[in-house]
Image (cartoon, rainbow, N blue to C red):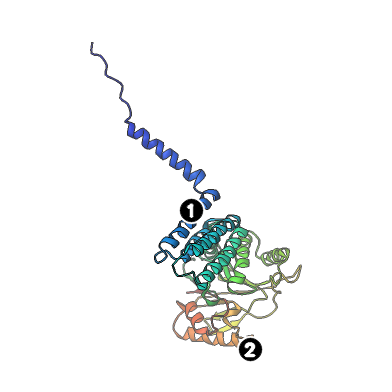
Amino acid sequence: MVAAGPAPTRPVYRLRAGKVRQVWQTLRRRVLPTQAFLLLLLTGLAVGVALLSVEHARWVPVTTMVPVMLIAAFLLRVRAMVLLYLVVAAGVLYSAVERTGQEPIGPGSLAVIGVTAVLTLLFARSRERLGVQGTLGESMLVDLRDRLRAQGSIPPLARGWDVETVLRSAYGDSFSGDFLVASPEGCSALEIVLVDVSGKGQAAGTRALLLSGAFGGLLGALSRETFLPAANAYLLRQQWDEGFATAVHLAVDFATGDYRIASAGHPPAAHFHAGSGRWELLEGEHGPALGVVEGASFPARTGRLDRGDALLLYTDGMVETPGRDLALGIDRLMGMAEQLVRRGGFSGGAQWLVDAAGTGESDDRALVLLWRS
């Protein structure tokens, strides 16, 4: 009978490596992200800068405290930053006192450190009000901006139909007060709403983010007749100061070409008739801007898009110029739309119209061009 050998054992180094990993994961999860640890780490860094600025002032000037404060603005809360800045102030004082036989710290260096401290505290305070640390706030805003754009993207339409949209914010900001929400009903119909929130650029961007989510939920969930009244009631409940919005709501049946369009204080849409070769402004009775009048009604206009016809929706940034009548701007846009037809087709027309409008960068601009080929 052969004696069995000793049972195989796990190498000692594997046990140690596993233990080290476990300790590191515990530190990373429970210790490293804490404010106490970060404050201790940055305090040690500030103390090191203070000591080195005395011994090696040429290579480590006292203004090296500025990067330490900038890092703190991204990682620490306001209370922890105040404690760190007390250490920074003590370090600067120590460096100034111990600089025997060296060039004293200039007032410019002290001013740079002081201004940096004030600005970073204000920066951290705004983050703390939002309830996020580090770059998470920017990540949240980027995500919201992408969601806003995604809600305005229109999927491929039924065969024989095309659409182009252009949204441009004032001064090229990432956020705009103009936005589009689309709700495709399979391949049979399309329902969209083009909205212009009061204000422009970043000032209107936060309200546009909120409204786009609300309108996206209402669009398609409610009947076409009740969408604008429901949107109006929603804005009134917000009780915003100057928190109104204009909107145009369009629903199109791809099988018949029939459309229904209703306006809430919005510039009139335009219908191109291929038979006559002319643009028709869809003027007439319309409702007030959203968020102004309780229980307002929003009369709708109906029509039909035949082959070769097109619909043009736009916001007032496309036609409004300071010091000029809005009607003149609409006439000018209609003139450019006629030039677009003479160019030989609508493809690329939305971009061309926005570029040719020449209303400047001081207002948000949005345009939707839908046509049937």
Packing grade of label 1 (10 A; few <14, some 14-19, many >=20) is some
Most extreme residue toward the front, as rendered? Answer: 101
- Nearer to the camera, 74 or 162: 74
User: Disc 2 marks which amino acid?
Assistant: Gly
Please identify the quarter of the rendering in which residue 260 is found: bottom right
> Circles 2 and 1: CB distance less than 8 Å?
no
| Circle nearer the viewer, 2 or 1 | 1
Q: Is residue 313 above or below residue 206?
A: below
Disc on the earlier residue, 2 or 1: 1
User: Disc 1 marks which amino acid?
Assistant: Gly
Q: Is residue 231 left or right of residue 338?
A: right
- In this orientation, does residue 186 appear? no
Expressed as whole percent of the image width and height from the top left, the position of residue 153 reads 51, 66
Please identify the quarter of the rendering in which residue 252 is found: bottom right
Q: Which residue is mark 1?
A: 44
- In this orientation, does residue 12 appear? yes
- Mark number for residue 323? 2
Q: Is residue 286 left or right of residue 271?
A: right
Q: Is residue 277 above or below residue 208?
A: below
Packing grade of label 2 (10 A; few <14, some 14-19, many >=20) is few
Expressed as whole percent of the image width and height from the top left, the position of residue 25 reads 45, 42
SS label for mark 1? helix
Expressed as whole percent of the image width and height from the top left, the position of residue 51 reads 45, 58
SS label for mark 2? loop
